[in-house]
Amino acid sequence: MKNVMWLATWTAGFLPMLAHAQGGRYDTMTLEEKVAAGAGYHDDSAEVIEPFRILGNIYYVGAADVSSYLITTSEGHFLVDSGVNEMPVGIRTNVEKLGFKIEDVKILLSSHAHFDHVQGHAVLQRMTGAQVMALAADADALEAGKDLSPLSFEGWEPVKVDRRLQDGESITLGDTTMTPTWVPGHTPGCTTWSLDTIDDGQRMNVAIFGCNGPNAGVQITNNPRFPDLAEQTMIGFDNLAKLTPDIYLTGHPEAPFANIEHLMRVQVRPHPLLQQQPWAEMIAERRAAMEQRIAEEGR
């Protein structure tokens, strides 16, 4: 049976916070209300768990429901996402538990500039001396320490971006190449990272899935701050549809890892994540839901 039940939970994003917003809209909330509503991402969700190898040279070093992925290479390592403020020390511990050195992280990447994915960037950059790289549209937010997305949520310590990337501009470190796909809508520079890895003698293409449209509760049509948000969101879905990963990972893994994490930890093959809903089907389903949401806003 395909592991599809997690999608509704994962794509809801910050849906539980909407109870705090009049009419279910974020633009009616103060920043203080938003920060209070997102407190859960600093508590149980941010508790760093025991690390494990997912497949190939990709390892999970993050928290219960806030991801951080270590991709190891022969010439140093990538780290994708740094989580919230509470996570960097735990991420360092996890990297070391796996037998690697945090100082060997050479490139620090992000899926998108929301607090639960980049708030630990500045601390981890100091720990590692890594270069921070991001798609240009999110680089401004990283350097400003502010959420410049339609969500306009909690901020972070500013971090200098060493290299501003364009859509499709690959980065190679050792024997691994990471390629960004621009998926605007959730944040201006939301990114899905793709790489090939060898697992059990088989080449696998893996996507680290950043986003699939604005958070629930964000006005998409006639948004005064982002007048082209609907168009940008559809560009994001167009770009996602061009990818053909064998396996995809997410920024909030608790639900997609449910019932299979123990299988991954003991390295069961065929890989448990091959039972995911097929990528093309999942993207089409998410796109249809977003188109319906946009149509309902326009009524």
Image (cartoon, rainbow, N blue to C red):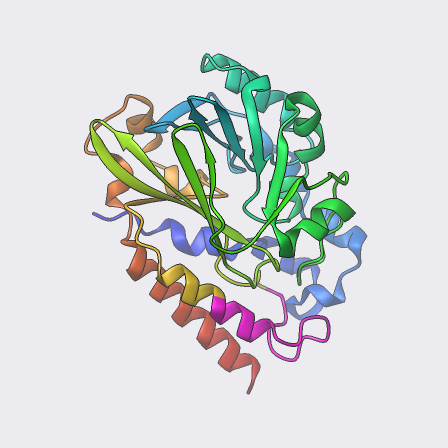
Front position in the image: 89 or 19? 89
Q: Residue at x 55, y 74 (%)?
A: 230
| Image point (64%, 52%), residue name | 138
Residue at position x 52%, y 51% from top? 191
**Whole-percent x, y for residue 181 in the image:** 47, 54
Q: Nearer the viewer, residue 138 or 269?
A: 138
- Provide residue 111's location: percent of width, then percent of height: 54, 46
> Where in the figure is residue 160, as x and y percent of width and height?
73, 39
Q: Quadrant of residue 103?
A: top right
220 falls in the magenta region: yes
Q: Is residue 145 visible?
A: no
User: Relative to residue 159, is residue 117 drawn left or right?
Assistant: left
Q: Nearer the viewer, residue 232 or 274?
A: 232
Q: For this view, does 244 lie left or right of residue 148? A: left
Label total for image: 0
Q: Looking at the rendering, in which quadrant would you find the C terminus?
A: bottom right
Boundaries of the magenta span:
217-235
Answer above or below: position of 179 versus 67: below
| Residue occupying image coordinates x 48% and y 69% | 235
* Residue 89 percent coordinates (x, y): 64, 21
Residue at the extreme bottom of the image, as rendered:
299
**Drawn side of residue 73 relative to residue 93, left or right:** left
